[in-house]
Structures are given as C-alpha cells and as structure tokens.
Image (cartoon, rainbow, N blue to C red):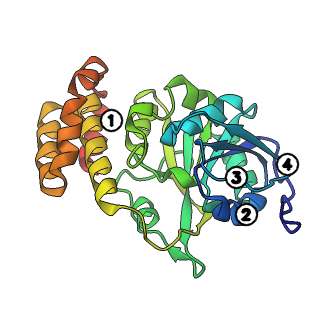
Amino acid sequence: MSPDIQKSAVETDAVTVVVATRNRADRLRETMPRHRARTILVDNASDEELPGLPGVEVVRLDGNRGAAARNVGVARARTPYVAFADDDSYWTPGSLARAAEIMDAHPRTALLAARVLVGREGRLDPVSAAMAESPLGANEAGRAVLGFLACSVIVRRDAFLAVGGFEPRLFVYGEEALLAMDLTAAGYELSYVDELVVRHLPQPAGRDTGARARRETRNRVLTALLRRPPSVVARTMLAGVRQSPRGVAQAVGDLPWALRRRRPLPPEVEADLRRL
C-alpha cells in the first residue's frame, strides 16, 4: 500500500459512496481517498491486484456484472442515501453533506444529479449543461430531469432498491435511462442540482469505441422495448441501424426477454420523455 493514501474525513453519516471498478487500480489510488463518507468498493472480478485502501469496504465479485455491481454496494449500505462514483470520479468537499440535506427536505426526491467538471481543468460536462436547461422545468429539489450520469448521482436507497436498481442485462453504457424511467414511473422526482459538484478525471480515449457503440445501440433498443410505445421502438431501431447494425442485431437476440419484461410507462412520464 502506498503510504500517501489516506482517507478523507467523513462529512456525513447519512451517505455511503458506492464505487464499481474493474482493472483500474491506478485510478483508484487517486480518487478513493477523496470520498468523504463511508465507502464501498465493488470489484468486478479484476485481473489485477487492488491497492490498499484504508477505511474502504471492498466487495470482490466472482464475475463482471458491469453497472449492476452497484446494486451489490447499495444492498450492503445501511445509510438512507447512496452516492455513486466511478473509479475516476469523486464528489467535491461539502457536496455529499449538502445532498443529504436536500434529500432530507424533499422526501419525494429519489435522485439528485450533480454538476460534473471534467479533467484537471474542470470543463463542464455537456450532459450537465443540458440538464441545467431541462425543458421539464423546476421541481421540489432542483431542475427536473429524466436522465443522469451514473458517476455523479446520489439516490434514496429504499427507492433504488424498490425499483430493482440497474438492470443486469444492460451491463454497461446507457444503463441510466431505464432506471430514470422506473424511478419516475414509481412517483419519485429526479433533480439536477448545480451546487453539487463531482470531478471526473477520465483517462485519454483508448478503449474499443466500436464495441461501445454496439453496446450503447443495443441498450437503447432494449430500453425502448422495455418501456416505450411501438412507434418509439421503431424509430430507435432505425436510428440504431445507422449507428451500429450489430448493436441492433444483438438487441433483437434479446427480444423474447424484453417482451416478457415489458412494462409501458405511465402516460405522463412518456409525455415528459417526448418533450426531451
């Protein structure tokens, strides 16, 4: 263990930070000490050894569950709120405590999305900029949204568990959309709150962008099949064919599973999605 890895002081006992990781020990050395709450690290069966992380509960999975590894961390948490971070992101000082205060004050709020600053220079993430201008207007806790970046949200634990968390079948890339729909359909509010800040320090691009495009296309189609009207499913599939025909083919392979689990959204939620 590197002697300079020291866990930051806890700023709130109401929040647990859950981080899912796989083969990113270099990133963990930098970001994990910055989490200012109880922290659970869920390791997606990494091939490499994890660094020593004092004060962090480590859960080692026997297989890679992708985004659904976060569900394991939430189940183990014993706090009313759970903040997600990736192995290359962290919440800035004061943000977790403030998020807990906001959630305490607004019991209908199931999720708060923070402002994301990218890189050492702190560029505003375009998704954050879009959420700040959401056409859904204001709700109790902030700006109403129907999507989020998983590395920068805090959730109400019981609401997250009640809707099933992240769908394991989606694995990674675009897994947030289905959860956002399900929380909203269950009667909860999702809010973007600009005063909450997350820093994201991604490594330079080097991953297989073709594989990511296939996975994103597959997941968009599956999410539409699971919750959206037939007309939206058709448009999503046509758009997917232009981006990644193989991604659409993979989704079609999962068609029987999706149809068995299909649960159309309430009309008011579908109407908000169309506004977006």
Q: Position of residue 207 (x, y in %)?
A: 41, 63
Q: Which residue is mark 4?
A: 55
Instruction: Please report the residue visible at 18 percent of the width from the left and 56 percent of the height from the top.
Output: 243
| Disc assigned to residue 29 | 2
- Which residue is under mark 3? 49
The answer for how far apart the CA atoms under marks 4 and 2 are is: 13 Å
Position of residue 245 relative to residue 169, above or below, is below
Q: Earlier in the sequence, mark 4 or mark 2?
A: 2
Whether residue 65 sits left or right of residue 211 in the image: it is right
Quadrant of the frame with the N terminus: bottom right
Three-letter amino acid code of the residue under disc 2? Arg
Q: Is residue 149 left or right of residue 269?
A: right
Residue 42 percent across, percent down from the top left = 65, 42
Front position in the image: 109 or 251: 251
User: SS of the residue at dot 2?
Assistant: helix
Q: How far is disc 1 from disc 4 in space, using C-alphas?
A: 41 Å
Residue 269's disc number: 1
